[in-house]
Amino acid sequence: MRLFSGQRAWVVQRLSALLILFLLVLGGGWLLFGPPLDYARWHAFATGVHGGPVVVLLFAALCAHAWVGMRDIVLDYLQPRALRLAVLSAIAVVLFAVMVRVLLSLAAHFSLGP
Amino acid sequence: MARPARPLPVFLNLFRIRFPVGAIASIAHRVAGVLLFLALPPLALGLDASLRSEAGFEAMRELLAGPWRGLLGLVLVWAAAHHLLAGIRHLLMDVGVGSGLAQARASARAVLVAAVLVALVFVAGWLA
């Protein structure tokens, strides 16, 4: 369980929190001050050269943050080793699947043109 | 199973532990975090649906705009609001802002109340 543990986990948790906070504020401003969101605008943003990486970055930060937090909770409340391993593995699989789903969704629509 | 019948130490008995306001804010932060973790897979699927087609986009928009499953929406908005506010409180404490006991208790109370208010305002918005 050395992956993302100790001080490194602490740093990952804080940095991802700041990134999520920043992107939420940015996204909130985009929704509030931009023209009303429709499919064309959303699709162009999320699958474009600028929006695509931002969406991936947001989900990567969410998954890293979730991993550190869920790991903390499991290590605090579940003591049997086998149970820990099973639950931590399940969490890792879920987060990995989320990232794969997001990357595949964006890749299927990704466009370099305007 | 026969367990030795000795009294548990006072501090390990959940019913006798005192929960100061900071502890309540902290455990709520964890509960909210778990709820948000559970919301991640649906969020990824929603992103996929919203990009797949215009009909999917509209379906997702309706899901977000409507009073979707009342209680579930209320719980998730509360979780997001509490986790965000409590997280900002932690980040400020990391840099030494408000980490004194009196201020920490006041901010814990403020976060608990504000998150509930945000959730209620959202639900009021849906019902209006």
Image (cartoon, rainbow, N blue to C red):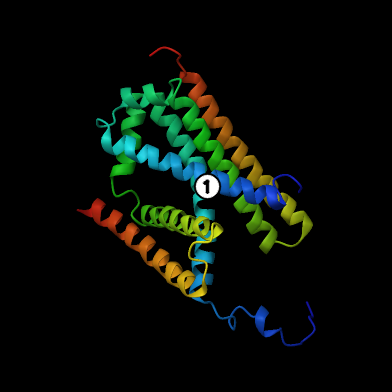
Which residue appears at 24% of the width and 52% of the height?
B125
Res A67 visible: no
Which residue appears at 34% of the width and 30% of the height?
B57
Res A35 → quadrant: top left
Residue situated in front as seen by the camera: B68 or A31: A31
Q: Position of residue A40 (x, y in %)?
A: 32, 22
Quick one: which residue is furthest to the left in this view?
Answer: B128
Which residue appears at 48% of the width and 74% of the height?
B21
Tell whether B45 sits left or right of A34: right
SS assignment at label 1: helix
- Chain under callout 1: A
Q: Position of residue B70 (x, y in %)?
A: 33, 54
Quick one: which residue is furthest to the front in this view?
Answer: B96
| Vertical arrangement, residue B96 with respect to residue B44, above or below | below
Q: Position of residue B1 (x, y in %)?
A: 78, 77
Which residue appears at 33% of the width and 58% of the height?
B118
Residue situated in front as seen by the camera: B64 or A69: A69
Res A89 → quadrant: top right
Residue type, mark 1 in image: Ala
| Vertical arrangement, residue B117 with respect to residue A69, above or below | below
Residue situated in front as seen by the camera: A26 or B64: A26
Residue tagged by mark 1? Answer: A17
Tell whether B89 sits left or right of A42: right
Q: Position of residue B20 (x, y in %)?
A: 51, 77
| Vertical arrangement, residue B29 with respect to residue B2, above or below | above
Res B63 visible: yes
Near mark 1 (Cα within 10 A), the count class, few <14, some 14-19 or many ≥20, is: many
- Which quadrant: the C terminus of chain A? top left
Counting the numbered discs, the total is 1
